[in-house]
Amino acid sequence: MNTYYIHYTSKTMDPCSPEKSMYKEAKANWLCTGCCSPKPGVQKVDVCIQDEQPDGPLNIVSGCGVALGRRSFLTRFGEERVAQHLRLGEVRGPDDQLVPDWVTFIGRHLLFVRGSKDAQHRVCSDCGQNLYFGMGKRYLYPQPPKGVDLFQSHLWGLIVPGYIGEMLGIDESDGVWIEKLPVLDKPLDGLPAIVSNSGDQHA
């Protein structure tokens, strides 16, 4: 059993803006307007952004809840691991040209990073997706599924078991925040177990 996991999230304060026609198409197809995130069951998405290049190794498309990753950064987690656990989509720039070193990603397994105070959980009234927010000490509860070594977090980051994180050699000089997440037997926020109902396999 893994007693702790490592969470990688973006340092950037500059999320990407969706191109207007893409946002309109997204709302008509894969985007839930109730919670501004991909609908449950959506496996991958392609996006067109107003920015020439996203900032940092990880980023998001604002208003869409779509995580972005630089290919060269994702490959540090292992190409086979990424192919097995993440669904990748294309990123295009304002001229509709492919941004080759960037992809969208949706994890096959999504974990909620829990907090110790001011925690809130609700179900989106439009798509039925679980939503969570919490402040304070961060941790995981319940124990993540066995046999999975790369997760997406609900904070648009990536989570790996501690022993893998120690081998990857990624540090904060690479442009990401890194935090160690213990796995607790009892949540600190007073809420029950909350699991993802998005993606093609539920965590």
Image: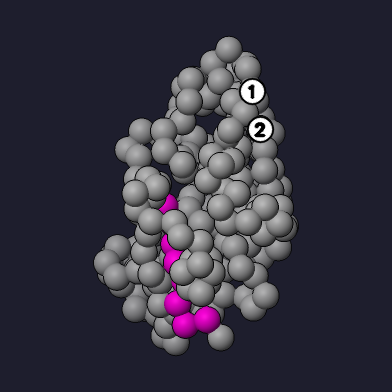
Q: Nearer the viewer, residue 167 or 117?
A: 167
Q: Amino acid at mark 1?
A: Leu
Q: Which quarter of the figure has residue 118?
A: bottom left
Q: Position of residue 14 (x, y in %)?
A: 36, 33
Q: Find the distance from the CA under tag 2 to the CA under tag 1.
A: 7 Å
Q: Give the tally of numbered discs.
A: 2
Do the residues bearing badges 2 and 1 touch, measured as CB atoms within 8 Å? yes
Label 2, secondary structure: give it. strand
**Does the magenta stretch mainly form a helix, a strand or a loop?**
strand
Residue that label 1 marks: 98
Magenta-highlighted residues: 2-9
Q: Position of residue 70 (x, y in %)?
A: 54, 39
Crowdedness near tag 1: few (<14), some (14–19) or many (≥20) residues, C-alpha within 10 Å: some
Label 1, secondary structure: give it. strand
Q: Earlier in the sequence, mark 2 or mark 1?
A: 2
Q: Amino acid at mark 2?
A: Glu
Whether residue 103 is visible here, answered yes or no, is yes
**Image: 97 above or below 25:** above
Residue drawn at x 48%, y 73% is 162
Q: Nearer the viewer, residue 152 or 65?
A: 152
Q: Is residue 35 left or right of residue 117?
A: right
Residue that label 2 marks: 90
Residue drawn at x 58%, y 56% is 77
Residue 47 colored in magenta in the image = no
Q: Which quarter of the figure has residue 97?
A: top right
Residue drawn at x 48%, y 25% is 53
Q: Which mark is residue 1?
A: none
Q: Is residue 128 left or right of residue 13?
A: right
Q: How is the image coloured?
A: one colour
